[in-house]
Image (cartoon, rainbow, N blue to C red):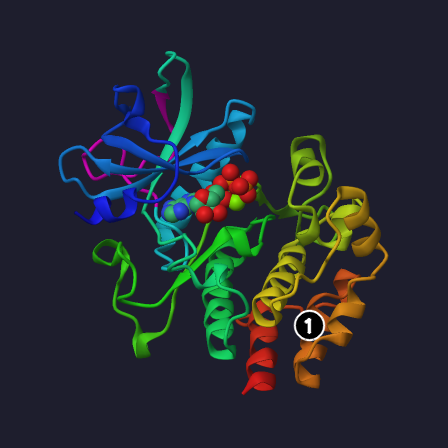
Amino acid sequence: MLLDRLRGARGREAASTGTDLHAGPYRLLRQLDGGGEAQVWLAEHNSTRSPAVVKVQSPASRPERLRREVAVLHLLQTAQTPNVVRLLPLDGMGTVPDEPGVLHTWRGEPRLFCALEALPSGREYNLIRQGPLKREDALAVCDGLRAALRAMHADFRVVHNDLKPDNLVAWRPGRSPLAVRVDTPTVGGRLHVRLLDFGQAAPLVSHPITGQPYLGPSETYRYVYDSGTWPYCAPERWRREPLDDRSDQWSFAATVFELLTGERLVRAQSKAACENEIAGGGYLAHVAAAKLPPAAREAFERALAPSMVDRYAGVPPMSGLDAFYRDLEGALA
Ligand SMILES: Nc1ncnc2c1ncn2[C@@H]1O[C@H](COP(=O)(O)OP(=O)(O)OP(=O)(O)O)[C@@H](O)[C@H]1O
Ligand SMILES: [Mg+2]
């Protein structure tokens, strides 16, 4: 019944050929999204009939991407962070694998897939898709996102590398049709927030001289520099300099800026125009012109500084993102 409500919307029907498509214990029902790196399907468990989302590697994308995503998600499940999308078991035994499964398309071609908790990512329930957020909602999203990134950066030394509004889902407790599965109690009725899409993630290693965690533009991690969502890529990516968690800080701040103001930080569209606007610092004019309290503009200017050394630095146990959040919360109070 729950799924019947979700089937109404537009989308390709898995069963339209008359043959059901299965991914492990899940039956694919309707394609929610696709064309990027993966096809995302609404699915249901064969025996429990509980909803799930199955992410299937696109024919054009490199299989390492889904492998990386599943490995990182598997790691993050162990930290039990409520703000990271949950990976679901594939074998019906209740265990979550660290490798994607393999399904066969109608043509018999093998594709990698993973199963995720089904989130209310559509416009109707997902506040991220509903224009500028109220201050308290933007802060709740910011808070959830920094908690997810704390686990990534501090516990596992991994950078996300693809932070942007499209990779976030936020909804009000009790409001989603998937509520029976995903709504867990929250204090004070605050929003539920989940971070998605870990296909661009990369591990930080110790710098040979400073000992600090960083990511160099080595052959292995070339994908980090060669692909991405251009308007959200930090200036050092364009300069092909080493990255660290402060590169996520830049994309995090660009995302929160957009959620709060309803305007993209970087307005350019093409790769070349984004490079020009980001590497040239032109985006800072949008921060200066934003209708925000001066202290909030200052916090954004710092988190979005062209040079990493001018951004918020973590002073354990506080992370750089904690410090940004503290300043933003104070400015928006
Ligand atoms: N667990 C989920 N529940 C509901 N919707 C989801 C889920 N995972 C992904 N989606 C939807 O599918 C879209 C694409 O998913 P995701 O970002 O993981 O795929 P991608 O193809 O790797 O990314 P991109 O489209 O950025 O290339 C998301 O923006 C979201 O709308
Ligand atoms: Mg995405």
Mark 1, other Cα within 10 Å: few <14 / some 14–19 / many ≥20:
many
Q: x%, y% of residue 132?
A: 55, 69
User: In the rendered image of this protein, does residue 311 appear above or below residue 68?
Assistant: below
**Along the line of sight, which residue is nearer the eye, 139 or 82?**
139
- Residue at numbered disc 1: 300
Residue 248 placement: quadrant: bottom right
Identified by mark 1, the residue type is Phe
- Given the current orientation, which residue lies at the most extreme bottom position? 333
Mark 1 element type: helix
- Magenta span: 87-103
Give coordinates of residue 82: x percent, y percent.
Answer: 36, 59
Q: Residue furthest top?
A: 108
* Camera sees residue 319: no
Q: Main secondary structure of the magenta part?
A: loop
| Residue 198, image x, y percentages | 50, 44
Identify whether 217 is placed above or below 140: above
Q: Is residue 89 magenta?
A: yes
Who's the residue at 55% across and 72% down the image? 322
Where in the figure is residue 60, as x and y percent of width and height? 56, 24
Q: Which residue is rendered at x = 51% and y = 26% of the image?
A: 63
Please name whichever residue, 234 or 22, is drawn nearer the observer in this view of the structure: 22
Image check: 176 left or right of 231?
Answer: left
Question: Does residue 321 show up?
Answer: yes
Q: Quadrant of the C terminus?
A: bottom right
Task: Tell me the residue at 75%/61% (across/down).
Answer: 308
Q: Is residue 71 magenta?
A: no
